[in-house]
Image: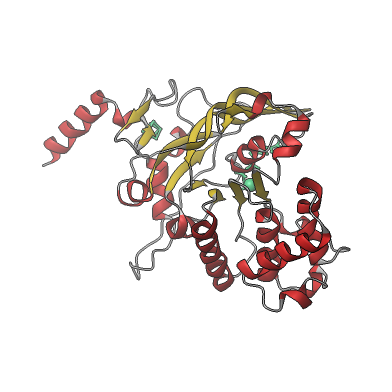
Amino acid sequence: MEKILEVNNLHVTFTTYGGTVKAVRGVDFHLNKGETLAIVGESGCGKSVTSNAIMRLIPDPPGKISAGTIKFKGSDLTKASEKRMRSIRGVDISMIFQDPMTALNPTLTIGTQLMEGLRQHHKVTGEAARKKALEMMDLVGIPNPKERMKQYPHQFSGGMRQRIVIAIALICEPELLIADEPTTALDVTIQAQILELFERIQRATGVSIILITHDLGVVAKIADRIAVMYAGKIIETGTKRDIFYNPEHPYTQGLLKSVPRLDLQGEKLTPIDGTPPDLFSPPKGCPFTARCPFAMEVCDKVYPANSILSESHKVNCWLQDSRAKKLLAETAGSKA
Ligand SMILES: Nc1ncnc2c1ncn2[C@@H]1O[C@H](COP(=O)(O)OP(=O)(O)OP(=O)(O)O)[C@@H](O)[C@H]1O
Ligand code: SF4
Ligand SMILES: [Mg+2]
């Protein structure tokens, strides 16, 4: 399978008066062409910082990509000039930002905002841009596109505005779309419609998608693969099947127990107790130690190695160590 994006050992830090925040601490993942990878995790774990780093939109100062590589179709974006990044953003890689309020300009018509990217990057004529804008509005399911082009954002509902934001992100036909919490601000029915729209767009255009969310329901619907993030690190990756049916990391297991499942009516939901560690001085070892029901002495001292469970499934947890496995088997045996 062709890899469109490969992120290796990515570190992002923010230097503030209070000290240095280690927001992303050695993240590795890849994205295959045409697939949807979801990055999930609690608030503050570094999802947005990771996606902003791919777009090279980390404000410097205070932020900095302090180590690692981000290879997009083989070329390392951490080394690209700002001029090259400007030609990539919105054209090869597009992003839907987390804050829906700032996504559209209230003073410009929807049509102008849709055509802006095309005009800027592809130097197309007004008529060709208009035609493409109408096509995109149709693709994202906006009725009466000709009339709607002339209207302003406040004349659109929240769901419709999000469709427009998606259309703007896709109008230059990017190969990679990064969507940071694209459905969080929407109510549940509209959320479902937007997720269906992502699926339809992927089928129609073959675009590869990174979907950032804290909502496992969203993930279950459209992700092919999932990367679970915790305190600036990816702690488990796998296919949707690996993560939902065979979660190995106690944090992933906790996340799954804390979301309602439609197929298990009346089941008890268990929130994960405690809070993530302070990223000013993250622990040397496993960052989940303080909240983990299985924590062992070694856990907060040494970071667990990446255990490869199958071609698709990887996890960083000391429970995968053969000695821990042996001990667990013995304890289970003595209880039996
Ligand atoms: N400009 C900044 N200056 C200082 N710290 C920052 C800055 N941007 C992000 N951080 C810190 O980096 C960490 C990761 O933030 P990030 O926005 O990536 O979280 P997230 O996983 O996207 O959370 P959420 O689900 O709430 O969107 C947080 O501790 C945050 O406070
Ligand atoms: S490494 Fe230790 S603390 Fe971390 S998740 Fe695994 S068992 Fe729990
Ligand atoms: Mg975020």
- The percent position of residue 45, horizontal first and vertical second, equals 57, 40
Tell me if 259 is positioned left or right of 264 in this view. right
Q: Which of the image's four quarters has the C terminus?
A: top left
Q: Residue at x 26, y 27 (%)?
A: 324
Q: Which of the image's four quarters has the N terminus?
A: top left
Q: How is the protein colored in the picture? A: secondary structure
Between 237 and 18, which is closer to the camera in this rendering?
Answer: 237
Residue 104 in sight: no
Q: Residue at x 33, y 46 (%)?
A: 242
Question: Can you name the residue that lies furthest to the right here?
Answer: 107
Between 125 and 43, which is closer to the camera in this rendering?
Answer: 125
Tell me if 126 is positioned left or right of 10 in this view. right
- The percent position of residue 214, horizontal first and vertical second, equals 54, 52
Q: Give the image quarter of residue 82.
A: top right
Q: Residue at x 66, y 48 (%)?
A: 95
Q: Is residue 131 above or below residue 29?
A: below
Tell me if 271 is positioned left or right of 179 in this view. left
What is the number of callouts on the image?
A: 0
Residue 144 in sight: yes
Q: Is residue 148 above or below residue 244?
A: below
- The percent position of residue 12, horizontal first and vertical second, equals 64, 29
- The percent position of residue 8, horizontal first and vertical second, equals 52, 27
